[in-house]
Image (tube, rainbow, N blue to C red):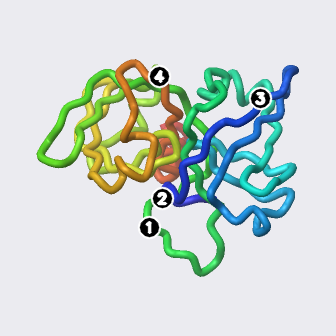
């Protein structure tokens, strides 16, 4: 489990061959504290560390994950939002994030509002029923508050600190992003489906 508060920006340093490739990411984390089997959220995707080096860690990515997230588009040098898993006693600064991507969206508009940046994303068909004004959503692993919803599109305001400390500060139009809906919205929708 994660919080959507990014603590490092790494980069893809190596991509292995095959249908379930090994990816390696650079990191500023102290990798001596990353155990094999630890979960690390990589731009919204929960991945398992299988090996570490001085300033990098490796994961294996399944074909299923490649097909359902933006990871299939990643190349050497792609910047990646990183977050270690939540431990008992840690501050829950964002919202509860599982690292299970619900769909891939894209940035369709960006504008400046004072020192912040207003970003508008379009999600995949069906995700809009889980997206509500003032609700939470995870975009590439970043916990954000939704300002406005219109159909499949939703807008968020990103403050300067978040722009500087995440990949959202360098995102460009048409960029694909991993989206995860709020877990509470997920269960409310499920209850509505069950109860008719």
Q: Secondary structure at mark 2?
A: loop
Mark 1 is surrounded, within 10 Å at the Cα level, by few (under 14), some (14 to 19) or many (20 or more) other residues, namely few
Q: Residue at x 39, y 35 (%)?
A: 170
Between the C-alphas of marks 1 and 4, the distance is: 27 Å
Q: In the figure, residue 39 lies in which quadrant?
A: bottom right
Image vertical order of residue 34 relative to residue 184, above or below: below
Q: In the figure, residue 120 lies in which quadrant?
A: top left
Q: Which residue is mark 1?
A: 93
**Which numbered disc flags the more N-terminal residue, 4 or 3?**
3
Between the C-alphas of marks 3 and 2, the distance is: 26 Å
Q: Which residue is mark 2?
A: 5
Q: Which residue is mark 4?
A: 124
**Which numbered disc flags the more N-terminal residue, 1 or 3?**
3
Image vertical order of residue 112 relative to residue 63, above or below: below
**Which numbered disc flags the more N-terminal residue, 1 or 4?**
1
Residue contact between numbered discs 2 and 1, judged by CB atoms under 8 Å: yes
Q: Residue at x 70, y 65 (%)?
A: 30
Q: Residue at x 52, y 46 (%)?
A: 141
**Which numbered disc flags the more N-terminal residue, 2 or 1?**
2
**Which numbered disc flags the more N-terminal residue, 4 or 2?**
2
């Amino acid at each position: 489990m994660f919080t959507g508060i990014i603590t490092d920006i790494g980069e893809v340093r190596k991509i292995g061959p095959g249908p379930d490739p090994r990816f390696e990411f650079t990191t500023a984390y102290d990798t001596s504290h990353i155990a094999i089997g630890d979960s690390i959220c990589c731009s919204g995707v929960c991945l398992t560390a299988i090996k570490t080096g001085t300033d990098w860690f490796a994961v294996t990515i399944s074909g299923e994950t490649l097909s359902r997230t933006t990871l299939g588009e990643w190349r050497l040098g792609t910047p990646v939002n990183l977050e270690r898993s939540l431990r008992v006693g840690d501050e829950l600064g964002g919202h509860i994030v599982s690292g299970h991507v619900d769909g891939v969206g894209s940035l369709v508009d960006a504008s400046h509002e004072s020192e912040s940046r207003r970003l508008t994303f379009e999600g995949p068909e069906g995700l809009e029923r889980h997206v509500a004004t003032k609700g939470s959503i995870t975009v590439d692993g970043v916990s954000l508050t939704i300002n406005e919803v219109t159909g499949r599109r939703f807008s968020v305001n990103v403050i300067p600190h978040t722009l500087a400390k995440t990949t959202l500060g360098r995102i460009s139009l048409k960029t694909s992003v991993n989206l995860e809906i709020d877990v509470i919205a997920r269960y409310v929708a499920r209850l509505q489906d069950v109860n008719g």
